[in-house]
C-alpha cells in the first residue's frame, strides 16, 4: 500500500510546484511589459523622410545620427542628411535623407563604383574629378551620350554604367597634305571612316587599317591614280600606285610580246585619268596561188580525116606562188609586203591534132550522084532581095558579093569557113554556089538565096556537102569554129 501511495503524493507535489513557477513567470512578464509600455510612452516622436517617403518613429535618442542608427537606417557617407547627424533632437523635428545613387564609372584605365547625387553624366564626371575633352567619347549603358544626358538605370535595374574613352590626336598625311585628327576610334580604319576620308582600291595606307590607334600615330595615305587600259577588245578601269605606263601594265598582268606596243610609251609617267592603248602586232607569212592557164596548139595530122581531131597532149594548168609578209594590228591588216614569187609548176601546153586527110565520097541526090569532099553541119536561114535592105530602084538591088543576080542556088557564106565560089549540095534546097556574104553570116552559117517570087523560110541546123573539086590546102579551114551556138533542134517546119 505504501508503495502505491508514494507516487501519488509525489505527483501532486510536482504539479503544484510547476503551476507556481508558471504563475511567477507570468507575473514577471506582465510587470516588464508594463515597464516597457511606460518607457515607450515616454519616447519622443520623430519623422524621417527618405527620398520623399516619410516614416514616423519614437526614440529616446538625443541626436539625429543616434536616432537613425537606433531605427536601423543604413547610411553611406555620400547620403545627404538634414539636419546633420550631430544635430540634437527637438520636438517636431523632421529628418530628411537624400540617398546617393550607386553608379559605375570607367575612365582612364580603371573602373570605380561611386555614389552620387549628380543628375547628368557631365555632373558625375565633374564630381569624380574627371576632366573631359570635347572630342572624348562618353557612353551611358553602351550608348554614346553628351554631358547633359540624365543618369538613368540600366534595363535590368542595376546601377548606371558610364564610360569615358579619351580622344587621341593623330597625324594624317594624305598624299602630301598633312592634318591633325582627334578621334576616339580604336583602329586606323575606324578613324579614317569617322573622318570621312575616302579611300580607293589601290591606295596604300600605312600603318594598315587594323592597327590600333596610339597617341602621336602618323597615318600616311598614298593615293593611287585612276587609269584606263584598252587592250584585246576590252577596257580596264583600274587604280595604281605605279609611276609609269609599264608599271601599271605589270600590275594588271598585261604582257607585251614581239612588236606589241603601248601608247603612251612604257616609260611615260602616269597621270590621273590617262588612257593607255595596247596595240597587238602580229606578223605572218601568207602564200597566195595563181593558176597559169595552159595554151592549146593545133597541129595537122595527115593520117586523120578532115573534121576529126585527136588529143596529142593533155594540158595542165601551171601554178605561180607569191609569199607576202602581212602585219596585223589588233587583228586588222595594216601592211602587206611581197617577199618572194616563183613558178611552182609551169603549165603544160595542150596539143590537139586535126585531120588534113581528104576523102572523096559520092552521094546520091535527086539530081544524080555527086562527089563531095566534106560534110559540114551548119545553121541555115534564107533570104531574098527585098530583105537585103536596098530599095528596088537601087542599082545594086538583088546583086550578090560576086555580082551575081540573087536567085535560088546562090547562098551567102562566111568566106573564112567556106570559100566563095565553092559548090555545095544542100538537101531540100539543091545544088548551090557560095556567091554572097552577109554581116550576120559568121562561122558555120549558110544563108540560102531566093528570088522575091519563090522565097521559102529556112531556120534550122542541117548537114551540107561541099562538092569537088577540092580547093587548095591554103583555102581550106581545117578546124571549124564552134559558132553560131544556136541549139541543134533538127529541121524546122517551113
Image (tube, rainbow, N blue to C red):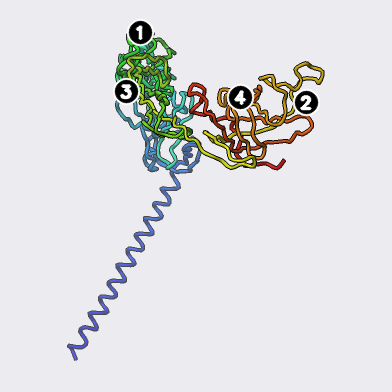
Taking depth in this image into account, of 150 and 238 the one nearest to the observer is: 238
Q: Position of residue 239 (x, y in %)?
A: 39, 18
Mark 4 vs 3, N-terminal side = 3
Cα distance in 3D space between marks 4 and 3: 52 Å
Q: Which residue, given by chain and number where applicable, does mark 2 sit on? A: 386
For numbered disc 1, what is the local secondary structure? loop
Mark 1 vs 2, N-terminal side = 1
For numbered disc 3, what is the local secondary structure? strand
Taking depth in this image into account, of 248 and 394 the one nearest to the observer is: 394
Mark 1 vs 3, N-terminal side = 1
Mark 1 vs 4, N-terminal side = 1
Mark 2 vs 4, N-terminal side = 2
Cα distance in 3D space between marks 1 and 4: 93 Å
Q: Which residue, given by chain and number where applicable, does mark 1 sit on? A: 268
Cα distance in 3D space between marks 1 and 2: 92 Å
For label 1, count other residues whose C-alpha is less than 10 Å away and answer few (under 14), some (14-19) or many (20+): some
Residues marked 3 and 2 touching at CB (< 8 Å): no
For label 3, count other residues whose C-alpha is less than 10 Å away and answer few (under 14), some (14-19) or many (20+): some
Q: Nearer the viewer, mark 1 or mark 4?
A: 4
For numbered disc 4, what is the local secondary structure? loop
Cα distance in 3D space between marks 2 and 4: 23 Å
Q: Nearer the viewer, mark 4 or mark 3?
A: 4
Q: Is residue 184 visible?
A: no
Number of labelled discs? 4
- Which picture quadrant has residue 10? bottom left
Q: Which residue, given by chain and number where applicable, does mark 4 sit on? A: 421
Q: Which residue, given by chain and number where applicable, does mark 3 sit on? A: 344
For numbered disc 2, what is the local secondary structure? helix
Q: Nearer the viewer, mark 1 or mark 3?
A: 3
Amino acid at each position: 500500500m505504501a508503495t502505491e501511495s508514494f507516487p501519488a503524493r509525489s505527483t501532486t507535489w510536482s504539479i503544484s510546484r510547476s503551476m507556481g513557477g508558471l504563475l511567477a513567470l507570468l507575473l514577471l512578464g506582465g510587470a516588464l511589459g508594463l515597464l516597457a509600455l511606460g518607457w515607450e510612452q515616454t519616447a519622443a516622436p520623430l519623422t524621417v523622410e527618405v527620398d520623399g517617403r516619410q516614416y514616423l518613429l519614437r526614440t529616446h535618442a538625443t541626436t539625429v545620427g543616434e536616432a537613425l542608427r537606433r531605427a536601423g537606417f543604413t547610411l553611406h557617407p555620400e547620403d545627404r542628411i538634414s539636419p546633420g547627424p550631430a544635430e540634437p533632437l527637438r520636438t517636431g523635428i523632421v529628418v530628411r535623407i537624400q540617398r546617393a545613387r550607386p553608379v559605375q564609372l570607367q575612365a582612364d584605365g580603371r573602373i570605380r563604383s561611386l555614389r552620387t547625387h549628380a543628375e547628368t553624366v557631365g555632373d558625375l564626371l565633374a564630381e569624380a574629378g574627371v576632366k573631359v575633352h570635347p572630342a572624348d567619347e562618353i557612353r551611358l549603358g553602351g550608348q554614346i551620350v553628351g554631358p547633359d544626358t540624365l543618369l538613368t538605370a540600366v534595363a535590368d535595374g542595376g546601377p548606371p554604367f558610364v564610360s569615358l574613352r579619351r580622344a587621341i590626336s593623330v597625324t594624317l598625311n594624305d598624299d602630301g597634305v598633312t592634318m591633325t585628327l582627334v578621334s576616339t576610334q580604336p583602329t586606323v580604319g575606324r578613324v579614317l571612316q569617322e573622318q570621312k576620308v575616302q579611300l580607293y582600291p589601290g591606295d596604300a595606307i600605312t600603318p594598315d587599317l587594323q592597327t590600333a590607334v596610339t597617341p602621336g600615330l602618323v597615318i600616311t595615305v598614298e593615293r593611287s591614280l585612276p587609269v584606263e587600259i584598252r587592250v584585246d577588245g576590252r577596257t580596264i578601269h583600274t587604280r595604281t600606285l605605279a609611276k609609269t605606263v609599264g608599271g601599271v601594265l605589270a600590275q594588271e598582268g598585261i604582257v607585251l610580246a614581239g612588236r606589241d606596243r603601248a601608247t603612251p610609251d612604257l616609260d611615260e609617267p602616269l597621270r590621273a585619268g590617262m588612257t593607255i592603248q595596247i596595240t597587238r602586232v602580229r606578223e605572218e607569212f601568207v602564200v597566195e596561188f595563181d593558176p597559169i592557164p595552159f595554151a592549146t596548139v593545133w597541129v595537122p595530122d595527115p593520117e586523120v580525116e578532115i573534121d576529126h581531131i585527136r588529143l596529142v597532149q593533155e594540158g595542165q594548168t601551171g601554178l605561180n606562188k607569191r609569199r607576202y609578209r602581212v602585219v596585223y594590228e589588233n587583228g586588222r591588216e595594216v601592211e602587206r609586203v611581197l617577199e618572194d614569187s616563183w613558178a611552182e609548176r609551169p603549165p603544160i601546153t595542150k596539143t590537139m591534132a586535126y585531120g588534113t586527110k581528104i576523102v572523096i565520097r559520092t552521094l546520091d541526090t535527086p539530081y544524080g550522084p555527086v562527089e563531095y569532099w566534106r560534110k559540114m553541119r551548119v545553121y541555115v536561114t534564107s533570104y531574098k532581095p527585098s530583105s537585103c535592105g536596098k530599095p528596088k530602084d537601087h542599082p545594086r538591088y538583088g546583086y550578090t558579093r560576086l555580082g551575081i543576080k540573087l536567085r535560088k542556088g546562090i547562098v551567102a557564106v562566111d568566106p573564112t569557113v567556106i570559100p566563095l565560089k565553092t559548090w555545095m549540095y544542100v538537101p531540100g534546097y539543091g545544088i548551090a554556089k557560095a556567091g554572097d556574104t552577109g554581116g550576120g553570116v559568121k562561122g558555120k552559117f549558110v544563108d540560102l538565096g531566093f528570088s522575091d517570087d519563090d522565097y521559102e523560110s529556112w531556120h534550122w541546123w542541117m548537114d551540107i556537102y561541099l562538092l569537088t573539086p577540092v580547093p587548095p590546102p591554103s583555102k581550106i579551114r581545117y578546124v571549124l569554129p564552134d559558132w553560131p551556138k544556136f541549139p541543134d533542134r533538127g529541121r524546122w517546119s517551113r
